[in-house]
Image (cartoon, rainbow, N blue to C red):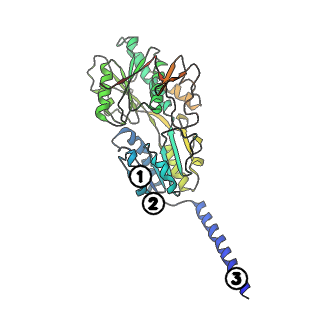
Amino acid sequence: MKRVYYLTIVTCLAMLSVFIICFRLMDLSKGKDHLTVGFVYDNDESTPYTYNFSLAKDAVVKQYGDRVDIITCSNVMDDEMEEPIRELAEQGCDIIFFNGYSELVRELAPEYPDIQFCQTSYMDMSDQKVPANYHTFKGEAYQGRYVSGIAAGMKIKQMISEGTITEDQAVVGFVAAFPTSEVISGYTAFILGVRSIVPTAVMHVCYTETWSSYALEKKAAQQLIDEGCVIISQHTDTIGPAIACEESSSEKEVYFVGWGESMSEVAPGTSLVTSRICWEPYVLSAVEAVMTNKSIESVVVGKIHGNDAYAGFANGWVEMIDMNQQVMAPRTEEAMNSIIEQFTRGNSNFVFRGDYTGVNPNNPSDTINLKTVYTENENTSYPLFNYILTDIITIEEIK
C-alpha cells in the first residue's frame, strides 16, 4: 500500500513538473510585456557622439512607449563602469547598451546571465571568446567617411576651378582623438574619398590624445587652418573644430565636414555635410529580440559573426545628414549618391585601393601596399585598417 502511495506521489510530482515546464515554455513563446532598458554613456548628450547614440534610446521609447522603462547613466568613464553596471542590474534591467570602450562590460556580463549586454565594439572580436549574453556592434563608418570625402573633394575642386586655391593648396585637416585603427581607418577613407575627386589632395592629422575636449579640439583645428588647410574634419566628440571653421579669419576659405551630429546650427556658413553611424537599427532589433525571447543575432539585420554585428549604407547603419546646399559644390549630392549606391550593392573594393603605401605606426616594419585591395570590416565590426599612407598623410602634434 505504501508503495502505491509513493508511486502516486512521484507520478503527481512528475506531472506537475511537466505542467510547469510547459507553462513556462508557453509563457516564453508569448514574449515579454515590459522591459527595463539601460543606457550607459561615456559622455552626455551635449557632445555629438553621445547625442547621436542617444537617438537610438529615443527610437526605443517611440516604438515601445510604456512597454519600456529607460534608465540612463551619463559621463561614465571606462574605469568607473562597475558601479553603474551593478546598479542597473539591481534596478531590473533586461538589456543594457554601452557606447564606451570599457573591458569591464565583458568581464561582468557572466555575473548577470539574464541580462543582455550590448557594447559598441572596441577591438577585434572575431577570435575572442565572449559570454553568451555579451554582444558587440558598430556601423561600417569608413563608408560614410569616404562619401564625406567625396563632398569635400567636390568643394575643393570648385575652389580650384574658381581660382580660390591652386591644386597644390588642396590640403585637408583632420582633428583626431587617438592613433587607433578605428580613427586611422576613418580618416584614411576620408582622404581617399577626397583624392578620388582631387588627386593632388593631401591631409594633415592632429591628435588631441582625448576623445572629448572642446578647447583642445578647437585649438587643433585652428592650428590646421593656420597651416593652410581648406577643409577640416574630425574624429573627436565636441563641436570645437566646427566652431574653429566658422570663426576662422583665414585668408583662404575654410569648410567643415562633420561626424555624428549636424553642425549646421553652430557652423551654418562653413558646414558641408555630416556622416553618422545609425545606432537605431541594432538597438531596436536587440530590444525586439529580448522582448520576444529570441537571440539578438537572429533578429538583427546585418553582417553577423558570432555575437558581433555590423552593417553599412545597405542596411541603414550609416547615413549622410546635414547636407548644406547653400555651401556644397554643385552636383555634390549626385556624386555622393553614386558612391552610396555602390556601397548599397555590396561593392566597397574601391575604397582602400590605389598606388599607396602605408606604415603601421606601432610597427614600422609592418607595411601595406594598396595596389592589393584592403577589405575593411571583413570579419569584425571594429575597423582594423591601421596604416598611415605616408605619401599623402602627415601626422603632427598640437603646438
Question: At label 3, which amino acid type do we have?
Answer: Tyr
Q: Residue at x 56, y 23 (%)?
A: 350
Say which quadrant the C terminus sits in. Answer: top left
Q: Is residue 86 left or right of residue 306?
A: left
Residue 128 percent across, percent down from the top left:
56, 42
Q: Which residue is mark 2?
A: 92
Q: Residue at x 54, y 54 (%)?
A: 290
Q: Is residue 310 left or right of residue 74?
A: right
Q: Residue 250 occupies which quadrant of the picture?
A: top left
Secondary structure at badge 1 equals helix
Residue 123 percent across, percent down from the top left:
50, 38
Q: Is residue 334 above or below residue 84?
A: above
Q: Is residue 31 above or below residue 40?
A: below
Q: Residue at x 62, y 70 (%)?
A: 20
Label 3 – label 2 distance at C-alpha:
41 Å
Is residue 43 visible in the rendered structure shown here? yes
Secondary structure at badge 2 equals loop
Q: Which residue is mark 1?
A: 82
Residue 6 is tagged as 3
Mark earlier in primary sequence (1, 2): 1
